[in-house]
Image (spheres, rainbow, N blue to C red):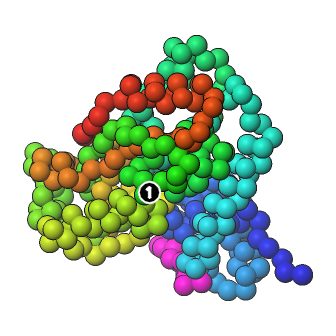
Amino acid sequence: MRAYPSVQQLKCLLAVTELLNFRSAAERLNLSQPPLSRHIKALEGLVGVQLFERDTHSVVPTEAGTILARQTREILATLDLAIDAAKAAGQCRADQLRVGITRVIDPGALPNLDTLLKELGYQGSVSELHATTPRLIEQVSSGRLDLAVVATPPRTPADLTCAPLFHETMVVAVAAGIVDPATRLTFDTLPRMPLFWLRRKDNPVFHDDAERIFASHGYAPERRPKPTHRDALFNKIAAGEGIAFMPASLTAMRRDGVQYRRFVPEIEAAFRLSLQLIHRTGETRDIVREAARALRSAVKPSRSA
């Protein structure tokens, strides 16, 4: 019978793959380096191949490590769904509101939901899930979430109602000192560096809209996969390995060695992220409908850095 790796071993694999540093990976997982190294060694023994090339200066995943890490993300995401479904089946109560928020924005861009609900007289509990837009749509449609704030969603299922909330302009995240802080950018004046860019499957509509904007401005940078963990992305930007585009709300996240720069107004008006609120069309719970109305009333239509 085949032996399978533990969830902890898989988490160690992802952490090292994304951060390319055993010390940083251990800190993310609240481990010391020796246990992390043992988990990676045990995983390599289980799989039967070397997963990382490492020396005193660097850690680089092998082709086998890259393939396993890519599949591991899907495995852990599926496991999350299974756990969420089990919790929803066993814990869903009339006094519980389950809300999803796209992980591409800073949650601080939204009003405090607990405060809004208390103003409505709601005394129940609120749980939050932060995930990609496709996953949030699936969770609301299946009944595991009541509401979700999603980013530039694709065509939503017929059983869901989708209402606009606000827009966020996109800003440029770049290593400190590369761009004049007083200058607003165009695609022509962006640093000639690789772009850390999202996977199309994470948000097909926004991805394709952005690609059309890039093409219209003749912007065709080298594209590199955007690390799934923001710490890893910021590390790469600070090291001068490339730039990234981010919603303006994320400028609240300060990182040494990384600066944010705005585009000129003409580009800001076109290159932005649309945030929308979804819930089931046939929703019968008053608190869900009231929470949706309260959120739509409380947010401002657009955000800039």
- The image position of residue 235, as x and y in percent, is 40, 58
Up-down relation of residue 6 to residue 128 (above or below) = below
Up-down relation of residue 116 to residue 25 (above or below) = above
Q: Which residues are magenta?
A: 52-64
Asked whether residue 35 is in view, the answer is no
Residue 61 in the figure: left or right of residue 172: right
Q: Choose between 207 and 11: the one closer to the eye.
A: 207
Residue 18 in the figure: left or right of residue 98: left
Q: Quadrant of the C terminus?
A: top left
Q: Is residue 226 magenta?
A: no
Q: Is residue 56 magenta?
A: yes
Up-down relation of residue 67 to residue 131 (above or below) = below
Q: Choose between 159 and 26: the one closer to the eye.
A: 159
Residue 18 in the figure: left or right of residue 283: left
Q: Which residue appears at 59% of the width and 46% of the height?
A: 140
- The image position of residue 271, as x and y in percent, is 23, 54
Query: Which residue type carries mark 1?
Result: Arg
Question: Picture quarter containing residue 5?
Answer: bottom right
- The image position of residue 221, as x and y in percent, is 24, 73
State the residue position of label 1: 155
Q: Quadrant of the N terminus?
A: bottom right
Asked whether residue 186 is in view, the answer is yes
Up-down relation of residue 142 to residue 166 (above or below) = below
Q: Which residue appears at 73% of the width and 62% of the height?
A: 7
- The image position of residue 21, as x and y in percent, is 52, 65
Q: Which residue appears at 54% of the width and 84% of the height?
A: 63
Q: Choose between 301 and 60: the one closer to the eye.
A: 301
Furthest residue toward right: 1
Q: Choose between 43 and 5: the one closer to the eye.
A: 5
